Image (tube, helix red, strand yellow):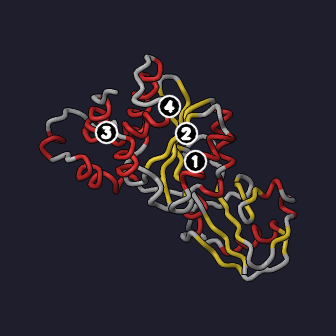
Amino acid sequence: MITVRLLGGAKKSFGLDKVLVELDDVKLSALVDYLVSVKPADTLQFDTKNMLIAVNGADSSALNGQNTILRSGDVVSIIPVIHGGTRLCFKVDSKNAELFCIQNQKGKNHDFLSALRNKFQDLVIEGVSPKTITGVLHAKKILSQSLYAKKHGLLLAKKIETDILLRFAATTQISAAISAVGIEKYNEFVMMAIGNKSDLDRLYEHIGPHLTVVDFSKNSKYLKKLFGITKKHIGSVESKHPLEDLLAEKAATLFQ
């Protein structure tokens, strides 16, 4: 039995996040052909030419590609490589940035993040709880503040990554920030990275097996409760995005 984990758009193609396949001692190409044959007809296209595939956590391209032999007990992770649309890419003060929804393991997320920072040293990489971000706009507002603070020597901590964490938590206390928006308590977290597009592309490919989807729309209620934001507060802001503006205001008023 081979376990196939379907991430990102692949999950939508099958309506499942996992498929168990009764195959053994077959090439990866045969597994892909099988998946194409069993995909529901009324779901999103399963684009076999643009996907990252990992076998037991190792990129298949580093093994034997489509000729990699799969055996019972193997875990195959599949995520589509999306060109020009659904990656959460954006600009912050002329710099490239991207959000990634990561599926890892509770209690081991900090180690995962540290390993990425060591491998991609030209990128600024930080993570927050999947419940404490409303999406790209929220991230853009916070990252913009941290980049400004770094440029003008106003960081809340020695490292910009810590500054980002503190601003998401609206506190200058690191322990309080970790408690409020830290990543260790969850099997999923949201990671953001700033840097050159080529480095972001390499990061995207590297973490492919860990990519998942987080529904940010459910976070507003939690964030309002966490930061004591009432209907009156929301109503007092003349904006299309009052919650994001209020969260950004809380972050902007912090001082070292």
Instruction: Name the mark nearer the viewer: 2 or 4.
Output: 4
Q: Residues within 10 Å of mark 4 (few under 14, many from 20)?
A: few
Q: Which residue occupies 25% across, 37% down? A: 246
Decide: is 170 above or below 130: above
Compare marks 1 and 3 and give the one earlier in the sequence.
1
Residue receiving disc 4: 159
Dot label at residue 74: none
Q: Which residue is tagged 3?
A: 170
Amino acid type shown at disc 4: Lys
Neighbours of disc 1 within 10 Å: few (<14), some (14-19), many (20+): some
For the point 24% across and 49% down, the residue is 224
Note whether 62 is above or below 135 in the view shown. below
Q: Which image quarter holds the C terminus?
A: top left
For mark 3, does the 10 Å Cα neighbourhood hold few (<14), some (14 to 19), or many (20 or more) residues? many
- For the residue pair 6 and 50, the one nearer the viewer reads as 6
Tag 2–tag 1 contact (CB < 8 Å): yes
Could you tell which of marks 2 and 3 lies nearer the N-terminus? 2
Image coords of residue 20 (percent x, y): 66, 78
Type of amino acid under label 1: Leu
Give the SS element for disc 1.
helix
Residue of label 2: 125
Residue identified by numbered label 1: 113
Say whether disc 2 or disc 4 marks the residue closer to the N-terminus: 2
The nearer-to-camera label among 1 and 4 is 4
Residue at 50%, 31% in the rendered image: 159
Sequence order check, earlier mark of 1 and 4: 1
Q: Look at the numbered disc 3 and give the secondary structure of its residue.
A: loop
Q: Between residue 150 and residue 1, name the one nearer to us.
A: 150
